Image: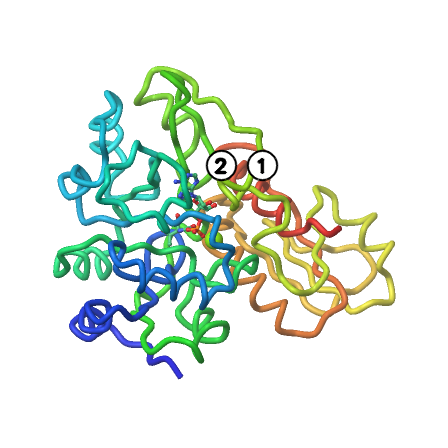
Amino acid sequence: MADISDDIVLAKQLLDRGELVAIPTETVYGLAANGTSTEALEKIFKTKGRPVNNPLILHFKNLKSIHPFISEIHDDLERLALRFWPGPLTLLLPKSEKVVDIVTAGSSRVAVRVPSHPITLGLLNSLDYPLAAPSANPSGYISPTRPHHVKEQLGHKIQLILDGGVCTSGIESTILGWDGEEPVIYRKGVITSEEIEEVLGKVPKLNQKTKVLEAPGMLSSHYAPRTLTLAVPEIGEVLKVHQGKKIGLIMFKNSFSGKPVVDKEIVLSKEGSLKEMAQKLYAAMYELDALGLDVIIIQQAPEEGIGKAINDRLQRSSFHE
Ligand code: TXA
Ligand code: MG
């Protein structure tokens, strides 16, 4: 069973040996391996049950260390890096031959970011390779934002979870690429379209395709609890439909006062802060998913700022065929 500790020396030893280590980032916990070792990277796919056509993000200590892994330097790169790194922005850039095939799943672009969590930055500074790290959950399940989430889901398969406490952002990084000269958002995230527009002087397009190679995190069913989950703007009607069942409720700001009575209710932000909602949402989903409920009903966020990324995840977590 994995240990939860802040021992980055041990983390380095394991990673140098080609083993996996769960790492904290400001967004969610990642399941990390040496990003230049095909053998180590294969363990990520096996441990998560992740399809091999789903590419990985490479995490670097700074912009300079990214240069050998990309074949072209985009005009916008420096400005974006200056404004958002270290931080929750992932960029899709043309890869160099230094990037091993399994990282990009055949794409000519590699996903890169510089995370801002001090423990993981400290670890990256001690390594001479980048870390590939998807979210540290079984494929398709909720991304972990606390060390014990990782331990519950993957603890029997790995040796070490680096303890970085609670992830401050709580949902995944924004993924940005380019279509010719046009910036395109491939996954909504912590950094909003408006913030990117401020830096680039143009509104990024939103990628609508759900082709596997574009970004499987954008596939319809993802980030999903095992309990039937419904995300809705108005709670009342859905609650009536499910009356008599064991119901868990996740509310944004206000407690639900009407009938019927639910088994468990979590209010994410009494102050009505979308940042706080993002930070606490996945933890609330983990908590309710462990209770053996019949249904989890989640109130959607107002469709503004980071609320758009929250609603994107809620929509995918509540998709059932
Ligand atoms: O916040 C985050 O980004 C977290 C932390 C751990 O850094 N990582 C994360 O990784 O969310 P993952 O693997 O769960 O999601 C990464 C997404 C996937 O949907 C993947 O398909 C997409 O990024 N992606 C990775 N490389 C890509 C590439 N070369 N082209 C297109 N999409 C890519
Ligand atoms: Mg993921």
- The colour scheme is rainbow
Query: Residue 110: percent from the left, percent from the top?
Result: 33, 39
Rendered image quadrant of residue 117: bottom left
- Check disc 1 and report the residue beneath it: 210
| Residue 284 sits above or below residue 252 on the image | below
Residue 319 relative to residue 116: left or right: right
Look at the numbered disc 2 and say if its residue's Cβ is closer than 8 Å to ligand 1.
yes
The extreme bottom residue here reads: 1
Q: Which residue is mark 2?
A: 214
Residue occupying the point 82% across, 58% down: 259
Q: Residues within 10 Å of mark 2 (few under 14, many from 20)?
A: some
Check disc 1 and give the amino acid type. Answer: Thr
**Quarter of the image that includes the N terminus:** bottom left
Task: Look at the picture and state if 127 lies above or below 65.
Answer: below
Residue 116: image x %, image y %?
A: 26, 50
Percent from the top left, x then y, of residue 258? 79, 55
How many neighbours does mark 1 have within 10 angstroms: few (below 14), some (14-19), or many (20 or more)? some
Q: Nearer the viewer, residue 235 or 129?
A: 129
Name the quadrant containing residue 99. Answer: top left
Residue at position x 42%, y 76% in the image? 157
- Residue drawn at (20%, 55%) of the image: 121
Q: Residue at x 18, y 49 (%)?
A: 61
Question: At numbered mark 1, what does the secondary structure look like: helix, strand or loop?
Answer: loop
CB within 8 Å, label 2 to label 1: yes
Residue type, numbered disc 2: Glu
